[in-house]
Amino acid sequence: MNGKTTTPLRNDCFALPPGVNWTPVEEALERLRSRLHPVVGVERSVPLSQVNGRILASDVHAPRAHPPSNNSAVDGYAFAGPLTDVPCTLPLVDGRSAAGEPYLEQVPEGHAIRILTGAVIPAGTDTVVLEEDCEVRDGHLHLNGTLKAGANARKAGEDIKAQDRILTVATRLTPTQISVLASVGVESVDVYQRLRVGVLSTGDEVKPVGSAVTDWQIYDANRPMLSALVAQLGYELVDLGHVLDRAEDVKAALEQGSEQCDLILTSGGVSAGDEDHVSKTLKAHGDISNWRIAIKPGRPLALAMFQGTPVVGLPGNPVAAWVCALRFGAPAMALLAGGEWFEPQAYVMPANFTKNKKPGRSEMLRARVRDGQVEVFGSEGSGRVTGLAWSEGLVELDESARQIEPGTPVRFIPYGSFGL
């Protein structure tokens, strides 16, 4: 499958200790982190033009320095510093040093030369004076102010030295990091193959968008949402479609996913009801742990292995599916894909809402920032999809009881902290 070369996950990697019921969020995240590792192979020598969003599979060292030579930071005149005895007059040599057209001769002692921004500083000089701070008359440079040696000069290798390690394995490449690679002449890098993530929706009441529906049926919001999430995180989407609450249909879809995917995301059917065939199928033909995580919104998070492929069973309600996909799925996918497990960056900001939070579970509230304060969506219902579009991140409240009033500091996690 997808050219895998790494060690597969154990069938029991998600198992919880006997007697464990409700699991705090931080404990659940740490357990998940400790049991996962990269499951994808490596692509060698991929050109820079094709690596945006990919994950490095090996460290990268600089083949040359940056900058490769001493050069000028300004337009002006180069001479040997320091300049302490002023006023001072220096004769100018014929010629100049420009970017891409260096002056290749030695500048005689006590002389100066015209130099432009980015140009190599000629031998015999080490200091540059801005052209605005001096005067040129009759072939001579007239200086009136002191200047320390090395002023306005960039030293060779001051940014990157040859053979420096510039990027490390597991780094997700961005345009700015690609710029660093290009600046020292790296043409290609080794990257992990893209994680192939299957997305499967279930439920008799759920119908794909574009289908005819009755009043007791709903359109499938989860599969488009989760598919877009997978694509935006940089992974390869495998659309496993929608299946009815039939054991044989669910099993067939999971079998297809196990053949084509490195990870499967499902939504719905993971509780213990009569028609929860995802959990039933995983119990009958795989290895499943229903992690009852102390989080709201979110019902049991089904973590399973099915024919060697990890399965993350998300709740059916869109808000709960979104929260669990971000909080648990995003860092897990990053680790499976060869990247680093991450804790999303949170910002402590004043609340612009009132809430009496009860103890026992962490809560994730749809939120956004306006005028330096965090406001939350008016309803906490996990079926209110309008709150997803309204929000720009999540407020995370821990398991303890809290009385929140306007001005109370709260943790706000923007969606960008999850890589979106």
Image (cartoon, rainbow, N blue to C red):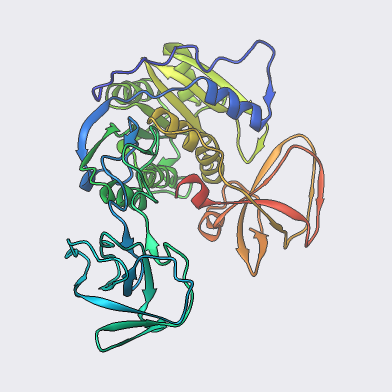
Position above or below: 314 against 89: above
Q: Position of residue 252 (x, y in %)?
A: 32, 22
Residue in the image at 47% along x and 50% along y: 215
The answer to whether residue 251 is visible is yes
Q: Quadrant of residue 144?
A: bottom left
Where 47 falls versus 42 (above or below)?
below
Q: Residue at x 46, y 33 (%)?
A: 340
Res 268 seen here? no
Residue at the limit of the structure toward the bottom, as seen here: 137
Quadrant of residue 80 within the rendered picture? bottom left
Q: Nearer the viewer, residue 253 or 51?
A: 51
**Residue shown at 45% from the left, 12% from the top:** 11
* Total number of numbered discs in the rendering: 0
Name the spot of residue 376 as percent of width and height, x first: 66, 58
Q: Residue at x 72, y 40 (%)?
A: 398
- Residue 389 at x, y = what percent? 50, 58
Nearer to the camera, 108 or 354:
108
Q: Position of residue 359 (x, y in %)?
A: 79, 38
Quarter containing the N terminus: top left
Q: Nearer the viewer, residue 219 or 390?
A: 390
Residue 281 left/right relative to 198: right
Query: Relative to 58, does residue 95 appear above or below in the rendering?
Result: below
Horizontal side, residue 77 vs residue 3: left or right = right
Q: Is residue 162 left or right of residue 419?
A: left
Relative to 124, residue 208 above or below: above
